Amino acid sequence: MYIALDAMGGDHGPDEQVAGAIQALEETEHQLILVGNESAIRGSLNRLAPDSAIVSRLRIVHTSEVIEMGESPVDAIRKKKNSSVMVAFDLVKKGEAMAAVSAGNSGATMAAAIRKLGRLRNVSRPGIANAFPTLKKPVVMMDVGANVDCRPQHLFEFAIMGSAYSSVFEVNSPKIGILSIGEETGKGNLLVKEAYEMLAESSLNFVGNVEGRDIFQGNVDVIVCDGFVGNICLKVSEGLVEAATEMIRAGIMESVKAKLGYFLARSVFQKFKKRVDYAEYGGAPLLGINGVGIICHGKSNGMAIKNAISEAGKIIDNKVNERIKEDLVQKFTGAVENK
Amino acid sequence: MYIALDAMGGDHGPDEQVAGAIQALEETEHQLILVGNESAIRGSLNRLAPDSAIVSRLRIVHTSEVIEMGESPVDAIRKKKNSSVMVAFDLVKKGEAMAAVSAGNSGATMAAAIRKLGRLRNVSRPGIANAFPTLKKPVVMMDVGANVDCRPQHLFEFAIMGSAYSSVFEVNSPKIGILSIGEETGKGNLLVKEAYEMLAESSLNFVGNVEGRDIFQGNVDVIVCDGFVGNICLKVSEGLVEAATEMIRAGIMESVKAKLGYFLARSVFQKFKKRVDYAEYGGAPLLGINGVGIICHGKSNGMAIKNAISEAGKIIDNKVNERIKEDLVQKFTGAVENK
């Protein structure tokens, strides 16, 4: 099973991409296609794994163009047909790869995936799912940025897609909540109130409204929201962890006693950091496309890339797209006509 | 200057309310009116400050009704005209108090404030402002829950009201950002894009889009958003701090070495906790009403109540409402016609 990796995307391409690829080859059974500038990729390979035999499980597909972080996604994928991200998804389209992974311009990755692979039957809008670390199992939140203005139908579909994805975390019959500003029925904005009714009438395991604080408790498995709200939740969480770490770090540097204390308790903080580190979760899948695509953070390091590759494998192994297709037919209860 | 305190509101009324009142009398010049069941209030006073002379700076206004946390705000304020929160705002209306503070049912507090005091001239929708702790000065976010479905005009008014409130934190010419999902102009949902244009055309010190992660950096002074998004940001932040604390606490309890380390570094964590603790910030003002009203967390303890009282005083001292009235006229550049 080949997975295509956009070797040029991200702030640290192709070095971190190649490092992630090497780790993935060492730790998993996957075969990889690195897509990008061949001489740059070979340069990284020679530096990072000069003698490694695993490189034989790796193909390189040369591309001449790269989509930069600041480019307009729609323009970029139209003009740069030979860009690494477009070619990576083209390999999936042609059946040469089972999935594509990119840490490049997220908008362009999304646009390339939809352009090349199209949507799954009955999906109105593909969306990005993100696994949040919690006190228990990860919670899948969807959408975290693909669709800024949504209709109730879209949130309903996110519930189905997010549930299918939660199988990756060994969740059965996932509990689904809708993100709102109070637990009581009837709380929320117009979008939430209408989507609530659709979810309540369906055969999904819908538990009602959940609040922002519930994201990290792990009492539900899937939380649906529009991509504007979801993206802000993601960035608020990242920003708060960063700011809190900085506040505590500054405090610790102020006294010898605190430094010693930190030294003794550091394993606890390392464990916490590992638990909330985006790199541990690899990337966020774009669900609803006719194939598998993983969007990684621009700042992804080798470990994040390796985890994203392994996540792509789990999505394939768990037949997430088949589940989505089935559930869209079975759970709709006529909702599809209202699209 | 009298400030009216709803002594019955909140999970721990009247004990914590009375404790907060006593602290406020000890540490500030304010005079207080405690509104609620007189015998319950006197009971708390006798327990908490049996011999204190400061009690002479305190009046009690007896009320017979209490609005409970779960009640529908609109029904409750219509049926319970003699409830502590309604009477507290009535005292402001009659000029017997300069401000009212309540930790009771937030919706009812908001409804009571608007019913009794009305809106400031040219304000379409009062909103709740919240001060977030950051690496620098607190950042004012508005609205954090009063208005779940907003029009661009409302966000524009939140910018003016939030700026006026930022004077409490000694901010001059506040930098205003609009919460979105990317820093570039043109990113965001329909509401954000339209409000962006209104803000950009005004004479406000508007810096453009800010992202969720920017809330805690302190690089802007005021962040505007609709009340649905703002409330979720608030709850996500609270939930993440709680979950992170729990994860770290559990880790520390696992080893003697980590416990010792925590013991040595605990001043750092206590300082951090103080910095992010809602109780340090007291309460969130409802801005845009013709008077001063502070909404406190239901779980407020004495310190939170004391800080809310002191915040009410600062809002009065800084003439926040006069600033709002002036700026709504000066900065509108014709926008008021589009309401």
Image (cartoon, coloured by chain):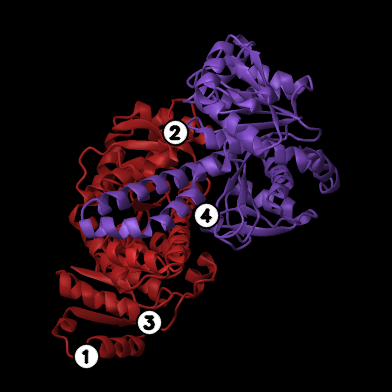
Chain colours: A purple, B red
**B179 with respect to A306 (left or right):** left
Label 3 vs label 2: CA separation? 43 Å
Label 3 vs label 4: CA separation? 35 Å
Label 1 vs label 3: CA separation? 23 Å
Give the structural element (helix, strand or loop) at label 3.
loop
Q: Position of residue B257 (x, y in %)?
A: 38, 65
Residue A284 lies, with reference to residue A267, above or below; the image says above
Q: Position of residue A86 (x, y in %)?
A: 65, 17
Q: Which residue occupies 24% across, 56% down?
A: B315
Which class describes the residues within 10 Å of circle 4: few (<14), some (14-19), or many (20+)? many
- The residue under label 2 is which amino acid type? Ala
Quarter of the view holding residue A89: top right
Can I make out residue B150 in this image?
no
Q: Chain of mark 3?
A: B
In front: mark 1 or mark 2?
1
Q: Which residue occupies 78% across, 19% down?
A: A94
**B206 with respect to A214 (left or right):** left
Give the structural element (helix, strand or loop) at label 2.
helix
Q: Chain of mark 2?
A: B
Question: Which label is found at residue B63?
Answer: 3
Label 4 vs label 2: CA separation? 25 Å
**A48 with respect to B19 (left or right):** right
Q: Which residue occupies 53% across, 19% down?
A: A46
**In the foreground, A61 or B183:** A61
